[in-house]
Amino acid sequence: MEKEHLPLIPGREGRNVKGYGVPIASIFVVGTICGSGVLAIPQAVIDSGWSGVALLIVSGAIAAYNGTLLANCWTELQCRYPEYVEERITDPYPTIGFRAAGKLGEYASRVCIYVTLFGGGTVFILLIAENVKYLIHSWGGEMFSICYLVLIIWCVLTPISWFGTPKDFWLGGVIAALTTSVGALLIVAGVVKDAHLHTDAATKNVTAASFFNAFGTILYAFGGASVLPTIQVDMADPNKFPLAAVIGMAAILVLYLPAGISGLVVFGADMKPNVINALSGGGVSYTINILITSHLVMAFIIISNPVTQDIEGFFKVPDRFTWKRVMVRTLYTVAIAFVALTVPHFNVILALVGGSAIACTSFIFPPLFYYLLSRQTIQDDESDAGYDDDLDPLTSEQRQANRIGPKGPCFKAVLFSFIIVGVAGGLCSTYFAFASLVSGESGFTVPCYVNATVE
């Protein structure tokens, strides 16, 4: 029986009935990216001043546009290579890198994705531990060491990570998006509520180090591009993912801006790396803590999935629940817990990952790969390969018209300007993050296995 083709270009018949649509895909984008970012954005905006607000808007716009470029790259590859439609691809981003820039593109994107998602998972588990610690303390309990809490949380998260792909736990994406959206709005309410406690708050001086550390944090806050192709693959109509990417990024920016501006205006130098810890106690603060922590649990599963799927694909692990999947995903969470215990402060990892790997996956690779793919010459016989005229009523010329390609010098200038901004910002952010780590300004402490009482 002939396999049905997915809808690669407008006008194609057939749908992936098990996939989801634009609304769920948009929710996955929000649920994946927005979470730890909304906790760190107020401090980032304060560290960079009012220029941080502009930086936030520009970064969000670029991230949205780059998300559409990446989506168009994947759709183009499905047009060129029908096997990417017939088979489930567990590593769509590295596949784009390979087709655009050969082995170098594949390896570079794969390494950056691993660093980005692994670092994000580490940040999430540390934030969950920190939020739980302060929630227990605010309710009159002991101030637990974050080291013990990381181990407890690892025990909770590991079994949840054994689920399949995002389409198998789409409800988790919905929960992640809803909790972080409500939590972001309550953060603004909590900041406004505490305004009377910070009437004499000093304005923080913006330095080169604070600005570029903040830039790294903002890059991290929009750093979900490495997960976007995985979300696109599971859609009923992958062609519609650019719309989902724009909607998702716009929603994230709408959540980030009020949190950042209110923190800058009200708290000033009184802000802390995790905005929850800067708020006074009470029902609003507790609710924010519970909501954001719930989001981080769901988002941890989502961002872990692309890496574990890639590893499972390499080792030929069946695409179903087996002991092999359990072993791969358990070992992966063990590695994340080990790094969290080694560097038990999320802001250090956040700045380093945001300025390095995330700058590549979200701001440099999408326009670069798009440009390289657009430069490739596609033969008519290759463009028609694998398509049945009964399933695809479009002609070869119409298919070619739907393809990505150079759109004039201005368009190329935009692509290269994004690449330059990503390279320059990423290098500067990484440098200053390392500098603050070496100088001790980041607050780095010894690992948990050297001192288990780290707070």
Image (spheres, helix red, strand yellow):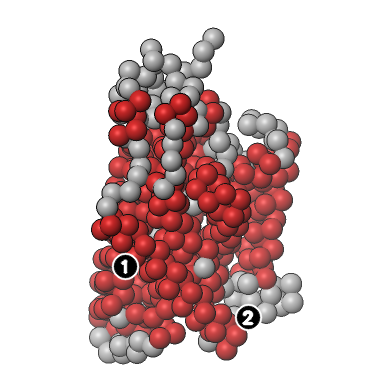
SS type, badge 2: loop
Task: Residue type at mark 2: give it.
Answer: Thr
Residue 256, position in %: x, y? 32, 63
Say whether residue 286 is left or right of residue 129: left
**Residue 97 vs residue 11: left or right?**
right
Amino acid at pointer 1 = Leu
Q: Which residue is drawn at 30% across and 81% down?
A: 49
Q: Position of residue 265 (x, y in %)?
A: 25, 78
- Asked whether 319 or 377 is in front, the reply is 377
Whether residue 134 is visible to the viewer of this picture, yes or no, is no
Q: Any mark on residue 445, and which?
A: 2
Q: In this view, does 56 lie above or below 73?
A: below
Q: Decide which of tag 2 and tag 1 comes sooner along the chain.
A: 1
Q: Is residue 382 above or below residue 296?
A: above
Query: Which quadrant: the C terminus?
Result: bottom right
Report, in whole angstroms, how far the alpha carbon at label 2 lies from the one at label 1. 30 Å
Q: Say which residue label 1 marks.
A: 56
Residue under the image location 34 percent in, 65 percent down: 417
Vertically, is 37 above or below 323?
A: below
Q: Which of 228 and 346 is in front in this view?
A: 228
Quadrant position of residue 292: bottom left
| Left or right: where 269 falls relative to 120 | left
Q: Position of residue 255 (x, y in %)?
A: 30, 59
Seen in the picture, residue 333 relative to 193 is either above or below; the reply is: above
